[in-house]
Image: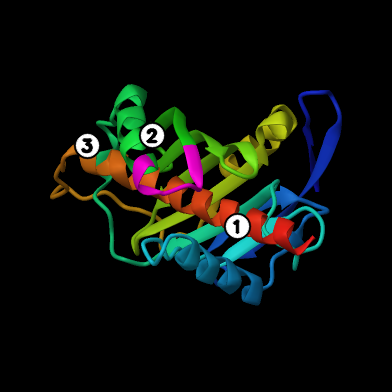
């Protein structure tokens, strides 16, 4: 196990986990529990209900602090695996600006109903060595309040492997170095590791902006619904 320093100077121990049928490894906090499949399915069902059927996200793996069978609550990590076919890597080389993403975020927020009050993209970057897109968003949720979501989406020969890390804004200064370590620790097996092709062509960057924002928006709707449900039960 290795240690990662919090911004306050403390250390948090990490452990290596294997996911995606052993094809990907990454490091997560050692005392975080794996979320059971039935809870991941529950999140997917609730996200569809909360959005009126517009959003139906699926999650294959997840890790969280505390009770793994409790309702969704940050800090938490969720993993999405999409085997929808190989993505063109060159579309990531000409990213939209943060300002363009913020403009698109406003339009998506208007369509999300009363769940999301604000979506504010903070950072976006592409790593051509690991073929990964890093995005950070600030979400102002109707019931939970401000949340930060750091995400990394890795291209594979089969599609994408995406890790989302969530923290309440007031706790983000502590979790940021941990999340950065988690996202940087992802290792993909050679059998599905992304390999560029000469025939790759560049589509419109606007499509990438919409995809990136929509992925985070879906999680925001899920989070708000589950928090609202939990508070009604208490």
Is residue 190 depicted above or below 220 in this figure? Answer: below
Spatial CA distance of label 2 from label 3 is: 13 Å
Q: Nearer the viewer, mark 2 or mark 1?
A: 2
Secondary structure under tag 3 reads helix
Q: Nearer the viewer, residue 74 or 92?
A: 74
- Give the total number of marks visible in the rendering: 3
* Colour mode of the rendering: rainbow
Task: Residue at 41% x, 30% y: name it.
Answer: 125
Dot 3 or dot 1: first in sequence order is: 1
Q: Nearer the viewer, mark 3 or mark 1?
A: 3
Residue, disc 3: 205
In the rendered image, residue 68, in percent from the top left (x then y), is placed at: 76, 64
Q: Nearer the viewer, mark 2 or mark 3?
A: 3
Q: Which residues are magenta?
A: 110-117
In the rendered image, residue 117, in percent from the top left (x then y), is placed at: 49, 37
Task: Residue at 48% x, 67% y: name it.
Answer: 49
- Quadrant into which the C terminus falls: bottom right
- Residue extending furthest right? 10
Which quarter of the figure has residue 4?
top right
Query: Viewed as shown, does residue 3 lie left or right of 113?
Result: right
């Amino acid at each position: 196990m290795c240690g990662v320093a919090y911004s306050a100077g403390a250390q948090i121990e990490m452990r290596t986990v294997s996911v995606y049928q052993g094809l990907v490894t990454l490091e997560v906090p050692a005392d975080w529990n794996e979320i059971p499949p039935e809870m991941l399915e529950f999140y997917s069902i609730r996200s569809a209900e909360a959005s009126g059927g517009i959003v139906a996200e699926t999650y294959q793996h997840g890790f969280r602090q505390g009770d793994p069978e409790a309702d969704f609550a940050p800090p938490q990590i969720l993993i999405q695996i999409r085997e929808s076919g190989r993505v063109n890597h060159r579309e990531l080389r000409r990213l939209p600006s943060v300002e363009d993403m913020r403009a698109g975020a406003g339009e998506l927020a208007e369509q999300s109903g009363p769940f999301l009050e604000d979506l504010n993209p903070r950072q976006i970057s592409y790593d051509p060595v690991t073929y990964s897109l890093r995005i950070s968003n600030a979400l102002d949720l109707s019931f939970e309040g401000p949340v930060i979501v750091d995400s990394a989406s890795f291209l594979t020969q089969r599609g994408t492997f995406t890790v989302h890390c969530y923290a309440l804004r007031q706790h983000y200064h502590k979790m940021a170095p941990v999340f950065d370590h988690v996202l940087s620790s992802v290792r993909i097996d050679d059998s599905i590791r992304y390999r560029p092709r000469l025939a790759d062509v560049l589509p419109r960057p606007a499509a990438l902006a919409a995809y990136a924002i929509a992925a985070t928006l879906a999680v925001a709707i899920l989070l708000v619904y589950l928090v609202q449900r939990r508070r009604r039960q208490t």
